[in-house]
Image (tube, rainbow, N blue to C red):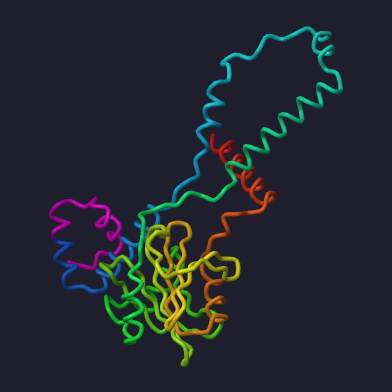
């Protein structure tokens, strides 16, 4: 049969007829070009499945559902005027403002973790790095495919930290991990990307650290390991580069802010999320 072409997505989603699915599966056994396209589509589909939308707190939803269906009866103007004393009006407005700010603070916290819990095989990564074979197993990702992945949520930048150049990339661990290798001729950096969120309980030997604007976990040594997660993707770096170079590399990859954000930042984020909920309603 001819190449799958525009039918790659239909094949991955199982939307082709049974005979067409069988014919396509047979074709994939002998066509590396279509097999690569199917792997990339599966990676993209898996990546997008981890992206969730923030949900409003249950308490806020309960408060909204308790509002009366009909507006209260209209009062005479002099009754309303009698209650509208400056002190009472100020107290009511202040109370309402505090309630809104508190709600904004509550919903402005860090977004919940998405995806499966992930414990990267750190010891295997480090052992393979020592044997200079970390990015040498699995199916090769051509340069053009890496460039395409780079625009679809899988950072495969041509360079990191200014002078670390991408020298290779492969799918590994059952085609579920993108493994990239960078080098400047002296230092080597291997970058692994996979769906999920990092299991903090599986970080024996790691210590929390701050690299640029990112909160990461570092296992010092030769090689150094750095790992973190962001928006449903776990990133792991294995490298013999110096710490300054590693920090610059981390700064060029997706990374999350500290959980302990400032009051103004958190309240501002909360108002933004509340506004988004209102717009979507």
Instruction: Say whether residue 173 is left or right of residue 223.
Output: left
Choose between 130 and 164: the one closer to the eye: 130
Choose between 204 and 268: the one closer to the eye: 204
Position of residue 128 measured from the top left corner of the image (x, y, whole percent):
32, 81
Q: Is residue 78 above or below residue 219?
A: above
Q: Which residues are magenta?
A: 1-22
Q: Is residue 150 above or below residue 18?
A: below
Q: Name the image quarter holding the N terminus.
A: bottom left
Residue at figure coordinates x 57%, y 77% from the top left: 248
Residue lying furthest right in this view? 86
Q: Is residue 1 above or below residue 169?
A: above
Q: Does residue 75 appear in the picture of this structure? A: yes
Instruction: Say whether residue 229 is left or right of residue 34.
Output: right
Q: Is residue 46 above or below residue 151?
A: above
Find residue 36 and report its image quarter: bottom left
Position of residue 226 measured from the top left corner of the image (x, y, whole percent):
46, 72
Residue at figure coordinates x 32%, y 81% from the top left: 127
Position of residue 47 measured from the top left corner of the image (x, y, whole percent):
39, 58
Q: Does residue 135 appear in the picture of this structure? A: no
Verify whether residue 223 appears in magenta.
Answer: no
Residue lying furthest bottom in this view? 185
Q: Name the image quarter holding the C terminus.
A: top right
Verify whether residue 20 appears in magenta.
Answer: yes
Choose between 81 and 36: the one closer to the eye: 81
Instruction: Say whether residue 281 is left or right of residue 174.
Output: right
């Amino acid at each position: 049969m001819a190449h799958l072409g525009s039918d790659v997505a239909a094949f991955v989603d199982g939307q082709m007829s049974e005979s067409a699915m069988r014919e396509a599966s047979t074709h994939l056994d002998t066509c590396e070009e279509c097999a690569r396209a199917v792997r990339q589509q599966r990676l993209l589909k898996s990546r997008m499945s981890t992206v969730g939308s923030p949900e409003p707190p249950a308490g806020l939803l309960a408060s909204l559902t308790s509002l009366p269906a009909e507006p209260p009866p209209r009062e005479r103007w002099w009754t309303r005027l009698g209650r509208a004393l400056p002190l009472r009006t100020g107290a009511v407005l202040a109370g309402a403002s505090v309630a809104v700010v508190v709600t904004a603070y509550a919903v402005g916290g860090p977004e919940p973790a998405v995806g499966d819990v992930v414990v990267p095989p750190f010891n295997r990564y480090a052992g393979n790095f020592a044997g200079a074979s970390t990015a040498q197993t699995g199916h090769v990702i051509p340069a053009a495919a890496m460039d395409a992945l780079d625009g679809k949520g899988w950072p495969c930048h041509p360079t990191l930290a200014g002078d670390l150049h991408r020298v290779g990339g492969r799918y590994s661990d059952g085609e579920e991990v993108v493994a990239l290798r960078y080098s400047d001729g002296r230092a080597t950096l291997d970058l692994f990307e996979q769906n999920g969120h990092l299991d903090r309980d599986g970080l024996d030997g790691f210590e929390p650290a701050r690299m640029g604007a990112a909160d990461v976990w570092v296992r010092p040594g030769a090689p150094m390991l750095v790992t973190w997660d962001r928006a449903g993707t776990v990133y792991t770096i294995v490298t013999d580069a110096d710490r300054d170079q590693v920090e610059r590399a981390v700064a060029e990859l997706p990374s999350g802010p500290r959980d302990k954000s400032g009051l103004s930042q958190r309240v501002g984020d909360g108002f933004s999320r509340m506004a988004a909920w209102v717009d979507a309603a």
